[in-house]
Image (cartoon, rainbow, N blue to C red):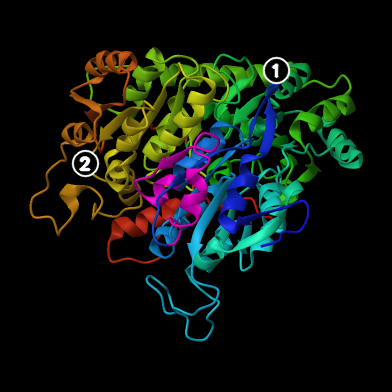
Amino acid sequence: MNMAPNTIRLTTAQAIIRWLANQFIVIDSVEMRVCGGGFGIFGHGNVTCLGEALHNVQDELPLYRGQSEQSMGFAAAAYAKQWLRQRFMFCTASAGPGTSNLVTSAALAHANRLPMLMLCGDGFVTRLPDPILQQMENFNDPTFGVNDAFKPVTRYWDRITHPAQILSALPNALATMLDPAECGPAFLGLPQDIQGWSYDYPVSFFDKKVHRIRRQTPDMAEVDDAAALLKSAKRPMIIAGGGVQYSGAVAELTRFADTHNIPVVETIAGRANLLATYPLNIGPIGVTGSNSANAIAQQADVIVAIGTRLQDFTTGSWTAFAPESRFISINVGRYDAGKHMSLPIVGDAKLALPLLGQGLNSYAAPPDWTAQAQSERHKWDAYVAENTAPGNRPNSYAQAIGVVNELCAPRDRIVAAAGGLPAEVTANWRTLDVGTVDVEFGFSCMGYEIAGGWGARIAQAEREPDQDTIIFTGDGSYMLMNSDIYSSVLSQKKLIVLVLDNGGFAVINKLQNNTGNQSFNNLLVDCPTIPQAFGVDFTAHAASMGASAEKVANPSELAEAFKRAKASDKTYVIVMDVDPYEGWTQEGHTWWEVGTPHISEDENVTKAHLEWESSRAKQRKGV
């Protein structure tokens, strides 16, 4: 067959993989592929064509075999977070349930604004064999299938119905994933016949390309308006979100805060922007925050929010601030920058902060305001020290966190997600180095912990191979998704996993009780369909997947076990029972809006509803 000049005949799948392998980025003066490889589970929808293409690039794009599609997506999201959104992984899954298992992962990546490429099987464009195995038939619209479910949870979605379409689809997908404002997951549906169809692609399409992540310069009129407002502040405060790290603006943030003597608080996503010892770090803010940050938030008159989407756990469902407070929001995303009547600065934080500083001239916050904030932080530090210390009391999350915090290396990465641990880590962890904490609370997804830890460890091994990835998980999340312990052993990507067993979904039981409800269907002992509750032998289970594992009785034994885990060369699981009722961090909380029954036959529920609603008067109104 004759080909046009300067073309190469490839299948659609071969062309996709060849193109991906030739996309590069420079990070810290080192050129590397922007796609670090992928996670894959093959089936009839992707093994014959995409699998064939991937087989030929094993060195350039390593493929990690997953245990479940959902956990693959979590691992890809954590990989991107570890690389500060500068690199990503792809996930490939077969048509039908293999692909639909990725919907939750896509939602997590979308909520957290993380890049992830999904290369997923689809039906046949010809429809000659329809209905096919695992096809979800829509009787009124044959083009509408299960892959359309990804449209609301992706930033870019396309179904490839002709080989030539990837000439535009791939660059558009990558541009989305590398866009600081639009960043998120991209989905390409790959019909099974189209994957194998060939086409004469321009050779130039596969030329090596080095990408850069755009830095958006803010509009100076917006900067001037913000500077004028901030110069009027008597009690200014900065909220530092996860976008500070994605921008690489930690140095600019600290320089800005130092120059203008402004206290800084952190969101959950921004939890490791600042070291615990940084003098202007007043602590984490919000529902799972600190007394110190929440105390100054109640009094601040001008608040500079940097790289945060201001979700309800940050704002205390918009009760954390004084009614008259004004907001300035620095964000690359227009949607986030304009929230809640903020004066927006739409632009990159690394560029915006120096410009805002120039507009402030010699302005500095009043010394007594900053001293008050620092005094509050000193009191909070004393509380955390007491809260995390071993003692003659029931085992708690906070004590386990304190043990690890004391013994881990500064660059070890901490991973937590759903249940009670995100709150406990956020409140009690004392950051030892910048960018070392991943508390996934954008989607707060059970099961992220171990899968995300595996993805983070793959990324960490590429940059800091001598450091550890340390995972805090409860028994509930462990039971939901634990198979990547096996993945980590197989791939020799060591994890340290702390399983803190409180006998069920204890944090939701706490919420249940705090709203006047009786314990029901959360702790195993409170499930009426369980005649006799018993605990899982997590050490035996983890050991069956090839990990080293042991159970400890108390924080002192945990400390010794953690030292053994650090010295080990393979994944190490440590299990400790914690009390489901006592030991919760009691301080540092703002109000959080949850739906409670307006009426109930239980007077405790009605009383709790009235008490809960009593804080609604403080709720800030706005869009």
**Residue 521 percent location from the top left of the image:** 23, 55
Label 1: few (<14), some (14–19) or many (≥20) C-alpha neighbours in 10 Å: few
Rounded to the nearest angstrom, the CA distance separating label 2 from label 1 is 47 Å
- Which residue lies at the image location 64% right of the left edge and 50% below the top edge? 620
* Residue 361 appears left or right of 210: right
Q: Seen in the image, is 122 located left or right of residue 87?
A: left
Extent of the magenta region: 45-72
Residues 554 and 363: in front is 554
- Quadrant for residue 324, please give it: top right
Pointer 1: what residue? 368
Q: Is residue 258 above or below residue 94?
A: above
Q: Amino acid at mark 1?
A: Asp
Taking the spot 64% from the left edge, 19% from the top edge, the residue there is 280
Residue 76 in magenta stretch: no
* Nearer the camera: disc 2 or disc 1: 2
User: Is residue 590 in view?
Assistant: no
- Quadrant in the picture for the N terminus: bottom right
Secondary-structure class at tag 1: helix
Q: Position of residue 47 (x, y in %)?
A: 43, 55
Q: Amino acid at mark 2?
A: Gly
Give the residue pinned by disc 2: 503
Pick the front one: 351 or 601:
351
Query: Can residue 468 be seen from the camera position used here?
Result: yes
Coordinates of residue 118 in the picture (x, y in percent): 53, 53
Quarter location, residue 168:
bottom right
For the C terminus, the quadrant is: bottom right
Horizontal side of residue 584 vs 163, given as left or right: left
